[in-house]
Amino acid sequence: MHKISFCVMGIILGLVLGTAAIVSGQADEEMLVPMGPIVLAPLESVEAKRTDVEFPHAQHMVVVDCKTCHHKWIGDEPIPGCTVSGCHDVAVSPTRSQKSRVAPDQAILYYKTAFHQMCIGCHKEMKQINKELEMSYKRLDKELPQTGPTGCIECHPKE
């Protein structure tokens, strides 16, 4: 169960960090990693219905390995953004009638599905794990981790 949480957290980071981190192909240069919040916004061709999301990158990278999120990163090349061609670059959601026929590996190509499944999915899974630990009545040596938001307004505050 914990492996799934870490995988999901990793995928979230991959989606978000791809557009912000830069890796040099030369061994003597360092990778530049943004330590502040990263703004997640829809593709340029999409009209936003909600405010952008401020993703706390540094808070997440403490928990997850870079390659977990940056699943197409080869390590000695620049980190590709999450909306690059062939990753999560589909700008239009499948209609409700099409969703039942769309394979999961195809549905995740829609950028919004990728963000929501990764972010909200991970936070919900962490909440479930925390709940199970609390209900197990085991003595915990440390405080349970915070899980992050799962509601629309929590991530997309009104302007």
Image (spheres, rainbow, N blue to C red):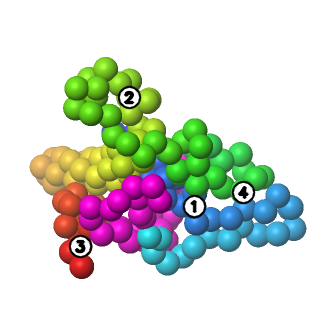
Image quarter in which the C terminus is found: bottom left
Q: Looking at the rendered structure, which numbered label has been put on residue 157?
A: 3
Circle 2: is it few (<14), some (14-19), or many (20+) Cα within 10 Å? few
* 24 over 99 or under it: above or below: below
Image quarter in which the N terminus is found: top left
Tags 2 and 1 touching, CB below 8 Å: no
Q: Which is more N-terminal, label 3 or label 2?
A: 2
The range drawn in magenta is 40-69
Q: Marks 1/3: CA distance?
A: 22 Å
Q: Marks 2/1: CA distance?
A: 23 Å
Residue at (58% x, 66% y) in the render: 20
**Side of 85 where 11 appears, left or right:** left
Q: Which is more N-terminal, label 4 or label 2?
A: 4
Q: Secondary structure at mark 2?
A: helix
Q: Which is more N-terminal, label 3 or label 1?
A: 1
Q: Secondary structure at mark 3?
A: loop
Is 49 inside the magenta-drawn segment? yes
Residue identified by numbered label 2: 104
Q: Which is more foreground, mark 4 or mark 3?
A: 3
Residue 96 is situated, as x and y percent measured from the top left of the image, at 22, 32
Residue 109 is situated, as x and y percent measured from the top left of the image, at 45, 38
Residue furthest to the top? 101
Tags 4 and 3 touching, CB below 8 Å: no
Q: Looking at the rendered structure, which numbered label has been put on residue 19?
A: 1
Residue identified by numbered label 4: 78
Q: Marks 2/4: CA distance?
A: 27 Å
Q: Secondary structure at mark 1?
A: loop
Circle 3: is it few (<14), some (14-19), or many (20+) Cα within 10 Å? few
